[in-house]
Amino acid sequence: MKQLVELYIQWKGKEPERTEKLPGAGSNRVYYRMYDSEGRSVVGCVGTSHEENHAFVSLSRHFRTKQLPVPEVLAVSQDELRYLQTDLGATSLFDALKHGREAGGNYSADEQALLCEAMRQLPQLQVTGAQELDFSVCYPMPDFDEMGVMFDLNYFKYCFLKTADVDFHEVRLEHDFRRMAKDLTSEPGTFFLYRDFQARNVMVAQNSPLSSFHSPLYFIDFQGGRRGPLYYDVASFLWQASARYPDELRRRLVDEYYEVARQLTTLPPRDVFDRKLRLFVFFRTLQVLGAYGFRGYFERKRHFIESIPAALQNLRQLMGEGAAGDYPYLSEVLSSLIDKLSSLQNSPKLSTLHSPLIIRVFSFSYKKGIPEDESGNGGGYVFDCRSTHNPGRYDEYKQMTGLDQPVIRFLEDDGEITAFLESVYRLADAHVERYMERGFTSLMFCFGCTGGQHRSVYSAQHLAEHLHQKYGIEVRLCHREQHISTIFPPKQ
């Protein structure tokens, strides 16, 4: 964080007035919104991979030369682990489509207009964006090839199929996988394949300062892109499991895409296009199930678990349409998988996510004693934060708490509290998971420091947010000496 602020100073000439951490996503990249004294903001990114950041920065700069709607990179650190980009706001296309999604796919006229615009913009990025593009900057690979396809198919096999306890013959399945990989990569790979084209990676920036673009939609998180065929991104977007697009709307959106794309490049006749698209939809569905299995069953992220039934419904529909007809043994295995759907949904892996466990997290001052456990179970963990650097020793922080940004910056730049919490997280995660498996109802974590104001407040807040985000269960947070209480409700 300190180095990101230094980059901002190099670019702006002075420190940001305030900085706020943005909600995390699926990657290890961390984003911050950074404001100047007049309330204008940019987004700062801290990554862990030089190659990944280099890909994003290079692709963004190239796409800007093609007048494509992507954020502008404003400044980059020398090691390329940090950069600043234009702020496109906080509303993604996924957010803008919430009403229609929650209505079971009954999208309003305005929502459908946004979807149509997304499908009209996509071929511009794929075709125009590929022109004069140096694909060697792409990360982790420059091309959509057989090796990448096999990686994704084996991801599905090991992270989803095996977790469903479906018996299969490894060698026979491998033969069908290799046949599918050849079919998928037989398509010309001359376009920019976004790879992660989904509603969460499209921003609705209607009041954006980037007025040179006519569309309100902007693309982000394209750093995993590579050279490849057109069909993949269409399949990825329109058959996203949780979107619940009705078949009629899907057909209309494919129409919108096809009409724009054929003006930019040579396409096969529509019936051939649709047949090839269906193969990519089939592949993408297996790939998504693999990701859901890993993120849900192994990393225990609730959102991915909840998306599995919709993805399986997509698979069931594709099987009914004969999508696996060219791969007879794979078709047999997938039929067995679908037959086990009900038992999969009732598996112990899923049942733990409906745990009755309630977690209580406290910050407190040792001068006033350790908080009592109201559940009657005898309490839980008590962590002593007094070994870490105390911001309360400095006049500028004495009237603040561990919830205030200057204190947060002090603690995180110092680093002692974050190292302390890494150990706490490992211990807490293991304990929470065991309690969920055993059906326990209460667990308590307390953080104490000298005054219950800075270090303990920071630690309690971060553990509460960590456990709620990771497990989706109810967390009750109390900063006792600050008289602040918050309830993080269970995610439904």
Image: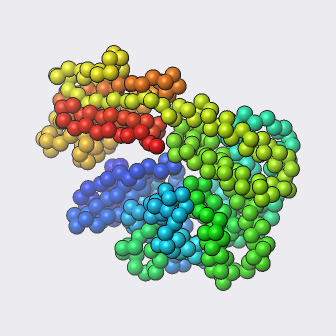
Q: Is residue 294 above or below residue 248?
A: above
Q: Which residue is painted at 72% across and 51% down in the image?
A: 316
Q: Residue furthest top?
A: 378
Is residue 193 something one can see in this rendering?
A: no
In the depicted view, which residue is nearer to us: 428 or 358? 358
Q: Which residue is painted at 44% across and 68% down in the image?
A: 204
| Horizontal relation, residue 101 to residue 450: left or right | right
Place of residue 257 in the rendered image (x, y in percent of width and height, measured from the top left): 63, 75
Place of residue 414 in the rendered image (x, y in percent of width and height, measured from the top left): 31, 39
Q: How is the image coloured?
A: rainbow
In the depicted view, which residue is nearer to us: 462 or 300? 300
Place of residue 30 in the rendered image (x, y in percent of width and height, measured from the top left): 43, 51
Q: Which residue is painted at 55% across and 38% down in the image?
A: 299
Count of marks overlaid on the render: 0
| Horizontal relation, residue 432 to residue 137: left or right | left
Is residue 320 something one can see in this rendering?
A: yes
Q: Is residue 159 above or below residue 320?
A: above
Place of residue 451 in the rendered image (x, y in percent of width and height, measured from the top left): 18, 29
Q: Residue furthest bottom?
A: 263
Q: Is residue 313 above or below residue 57?
A: above
| Horizontal relation, residue 331 to residue 20: left or right | right
Q: Which residue is painted at 47% across and 37% down in the image?
A: 471
Please identify the quarter of the rendering in which residue 131 is found.
Answer: bottom right
Q: Is residue 375 above or below residue 336?
A: above
